[in-house]
Image (cartoon, rainbow, N blue to C red):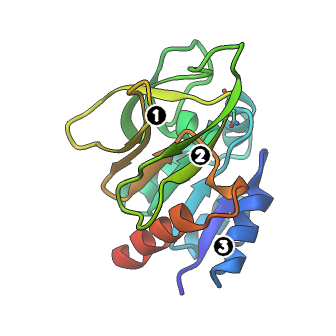
Amino acid sequence: MPIIGVLAIQGDFLEHQQVLARLGVDAPEIKLPSQLEDIDGLIIPGGESTTIVQLIDIYGFRQPLTERVRSGLPLWGTCAGMIVIADRLRDRRPDPLRLMDIDVSRNAFGRQIDSFEEDIALEGIEGPDFRAVFIRAPAVNLMGDSVKVLAKVRDGRPVAVRQDRMLATSFHPELTGDDRVHQLFVRMVENST
Ligand code: GLN
């Protein structure tokens, strides 16, 4: 079984660790850049993207994390994590890591409806639609040719995308008790080693 680290500086990293534990995957908290050496994949959880990026810079994660991912470490960003790994944002803050070729808007679904749920068809997972929980969620506006859309919401906006060994979802699969997106990422990690 691979070791999938969860960036544990802010946000709902614990919920991801719980899902991975259910799947029998070792999921250490990543709190220091040196710990990036010991993992086969990394999840950046939801939370508050400006805070996460600030702490990434304060703890010295930006360069080693970028290098590890560019040399093939599988990476999954959920919600704020999608914002953190984006190439371009429509917002003035934060300064993202520019790892995935996507152009993202924060809080893309408006202030009135800042949380909602929708059943979405997600390419790469079997069975019924996935109940996606959106909490002040981002959405992808534009993407490069090497990025594949795995799921869209009813209004047509992409909310799950993949580029090589990187996955980004604007919803929170760790909150639903449905482990299929985590299983998808585990398979991506297994196939990369
Ligand atoms: N709106 C938050 C941000 O911009 C993300 C929300 C979330 O991760 N649930 O950072």
Question: Circle 2 sits in a helix, a strand or a loop, which is it?
Answer: strand
Residue that numbered label 1 is attached to: 153
Question: Circle 3 sits in a helix, a strand or a loop, which is it?
Answer: helix
Q: Quadrant of the C terminus?
A: bottom left
- Amino acid type, residue under disc 1 in the picture: Val
In-front residue for pair 130/162:
130
Label 3 vs 2, first from the N-terminus: 3
Density class for disc 1 (Cα within 10 Å; few <14, some 14-19, many ≥20) is: some
The reply to whether the residue tagged 2 has its Cβ within 8 angstroms of ligand 1 is no
Label 2 vs 1, first from the N-terminus: 2
Question: Circle 1 sits in a helix, a strand or a loop, which is it?
Answer: loop
Instruction: Decide if residue 165 is on the left or right side of residue 177.
Output: left
Q: Is residue 19 above or below residue 22?
A: above
What is the count of numbered marks?
3
Residue that numbered label 2 is attached to: 132
Q: Are marks 2 and 1 in contact (CB under 8 Å)?
A: yes
Determine the image quadrant of residue 144.
top left
Label 1 vs 3, first from the N-terminus: 3
Residue that numbered label 3 is attached to: 20
- Amino acid type, residue under disc 3 in the picture: Leu
In-front residue for pair 23/120:
120
Residue at image x 75%, y 32%? 51
